Image (cartoon, rainbow, N blue to C red):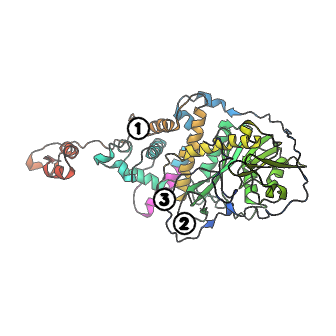
């Protein structure tokens, strides 16, 4: 999808003012009555990005740097070899520990809520929670106007499988009671405290199941949310203008290893948000000789120097306004196909190339030479890594389970479990087999919903009508079979008038 990523930006006036990300289209934004944080990621995250850095000397002669040796193990964990079905790979992330957490906290929260309302609550189980998640995946695959339409008897909606798996009221009760941590035990210093236990388990599973390649990429995603939450962001350049921002570290094969929330106002942070995010995401992967690709929001000379000190090369697009970029690179006029570069005494290359438009790149390992099609090698290497990660983000954006009324932490939960974790499981499955992502998702949903009926609730079974003598009858009701047949053959109005009535108990 992104074969020519760095060379085919949109034609806006600001060459370096947009992030490189594919997102779903959003509905029109409604006016909000609560303040939001403006995401200044396109403007001033590097507060001191002006002027040149006198401590570094630049030269128009460049040499390649292969200064670090990468000797880490890569690839899937040995346990992945035993996963022969899509559900086996997905359960590497949907672990028994995660399911137990969901069941325990949901039951606890539901009992507290029902106690206030003087209602009873039937405890959920692991098997029921699996069926609940299966229905959520199914709703992402089969789109209907509203949630209740999945249980509708109207012929236009077809025969929904949801009616065979779980009663509608039970599904809605589970969705409204879904919880992951007790408020009294939560670490409220974390912005994601309501979802943090789930996030920790998924990160642990992701890092254990796959050792990333040498090349990694930092990217971000915006989870649509218009609710009243302090951590909501406004980014006018995104399709999802309002939402909850998450940062991700993904490897070249589009496998996501780490997820972190956006913390623009962290009082303990020193330096820019972008530098802090990258260094925190890379913790555990530094000092190993890796290559890291970033887009122009993250890339800076200060970040490149910090990563070099930890034996990590930085490659990425960079804005011309960043601090330390020589004026010769900023102001050099280029014709199509022209390349101009300078390298400093630390081996960091700044390259300016004009294709359809000007592109400015930073690399800690390249020398400005060209590869195929007269394209700079640092651009080619960047496209290979960034393109695969954007492909993963695109896969995750397909068929999401999103309800407009969902609380923010429910939205984050379903994004992590039914999109990010599902793409990771699909990537692991395709190590040994080949399957389209949508087919993989359908296969997982079918197993979770238990369509063979071993653990079904029995909802949807027809009531048995017994004709009894009139003297002992308590009333007359329409024959369900006759009514359903007339609705299908004629109309609901016709069935109400003509359906046969029988005496029932």
- What percent of the width, then of the height, locates residue 176? 46, 56
Label 1 SS = loop
Residue that mark 3 sits on: 27
- What percent of the width, then of the height, locates residue 470? 8, 48
First reached walking from the N terminus: tag 1 or tag 3: 3
Say the numbered circle drawn on residue 228.
Answer: 2
- Residue at 49 percent of width and 43 percent of height: 126
- The reply, left or right, for residue 502 in relation to residue 197 is left
Select label 2 or label 3 by which is in front.
3
Label 2 SS = loop
Quadrant where the N terminus lies?
Answer: top right
> Can residue 92 be seen here?
no
Judge by depth and name the residue closer to the eye, 335 or 371: 335
Residue 151, magenta (yes or no): no
Q: CA distance from mark 2 to mark 3?
A: 18 Å
Judge by depth and name the residue closer to the eye, 122 or 224: 224
Residue that mark 1 sits on: 455
- 69 is higher (above) or lower (below) than 221: above
- What percent of the width, then of the height, locates residue 491? 20, 49
- 1 and 3 marks in contact (CB < 8 Å): no
Question: Magenta span covers which residues?
Answer: 104-120
The quadrant holding residue 69 is: top right
- Residue at 84 percent of width and 59 percent of height: 327
Judge by depth and name the residue closer to the eye, 371 or 322: 371
């Amino acid at each position: 999808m992104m074969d020519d990523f760095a060379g085919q930006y949109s034609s806006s006036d600001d060459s370096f003012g947009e992030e490189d990300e594919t997102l779903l289209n959003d509905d029109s934004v409604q006016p909000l009555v609560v303040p939001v944080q403006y995401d200044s990621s396109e403007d001033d995250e590097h507060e001191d990005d002006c002027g040149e850095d006198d401590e570094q000397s630049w030269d128009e002669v460049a040499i390649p740097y292969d200064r670090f040796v990468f000797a880490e193990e890569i690839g899937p964990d040995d346990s992945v070899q035993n996963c022969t079905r899509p559900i086996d790979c997905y359960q590497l992330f949907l672990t028994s520990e995660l399911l137990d957490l969901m069941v325990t906290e949901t039951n606890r929260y539901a009992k507290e809520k029902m106690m206030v309302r003087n209602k009873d609550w039937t405890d959920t189980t692991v098997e029921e929670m699996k069926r609940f998640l299966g229905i959520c995946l199914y709703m992402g695959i089969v789109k209907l106007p509203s949630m209740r339409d999945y249980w509708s008897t109207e012929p236009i909606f077809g025969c929904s499988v949801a009616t065979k798996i779980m009663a509608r009221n039970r599904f809605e009760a589970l969705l409204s009671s879904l919880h992951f941590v007790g408020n009294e035990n939560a670490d409220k210093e974390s912005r994601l405290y309501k979802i943090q236990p789930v996030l920790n388990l998924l990160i642990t599973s992701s890092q254990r199941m796959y050792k990333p390649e040498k090349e990694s990429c930092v990217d971000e995603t915006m989870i649509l949310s218009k609710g009243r939450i302090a951590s909501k962001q406004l980014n006018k350049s995104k399709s999802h203008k309002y939402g909850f921002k998450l940062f991700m570290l993904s490897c070249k094969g589009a496998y996501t290893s780490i997820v972190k929330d956006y913390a623009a106002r962290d009082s303990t942070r020193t330096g820019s948000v972008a530098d802090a995010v990258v260094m925190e995401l890379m913790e555990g992967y530094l000092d190993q000789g890796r290559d890291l690709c970033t887009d122009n929001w993250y890339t800076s000379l200060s970040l490149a120097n910090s990563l070099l000190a930890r034996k990590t090369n930085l490659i990425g697009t960079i804005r011309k306004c960043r601090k330390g970029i020589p004026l010769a690179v900023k102001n050099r006029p280029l014709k199509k196909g022209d390349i101009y570069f300078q390298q400093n005494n630390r081996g960091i290359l700044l390259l300016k190339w004009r294709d359809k438009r000007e592109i400015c790149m930073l690399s800690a390992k390249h020398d400005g030479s060209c590869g195929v099609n007269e394209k700079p090698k640092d651009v080619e290497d960047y496209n290979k890594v960034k393109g695969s990660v954007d492909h993963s983000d695109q896969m995750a954006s397909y068929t999401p389970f999103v309800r407009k009324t969902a609380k923010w932490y429910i939205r984050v939960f379903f994004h992590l479990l039914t999109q990010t974790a599902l793409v990771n499981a699909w990537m692991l499955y395709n190590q040994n087999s080949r399957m389209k992502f949508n087919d993989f998702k359908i296969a997982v949903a079918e197993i979770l919903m238990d369509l063979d009926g071993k653990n079904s609730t029995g909802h949807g079974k027809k009531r048995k009508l017994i004709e009894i003598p009139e003297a002992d009858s308590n009333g007359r009701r329409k024959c369900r079979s006759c009514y359903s047949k007339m609705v299908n053959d004629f109309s609901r109005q016709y069935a109400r008038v003509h359906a046969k009535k029988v005496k029932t108990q």
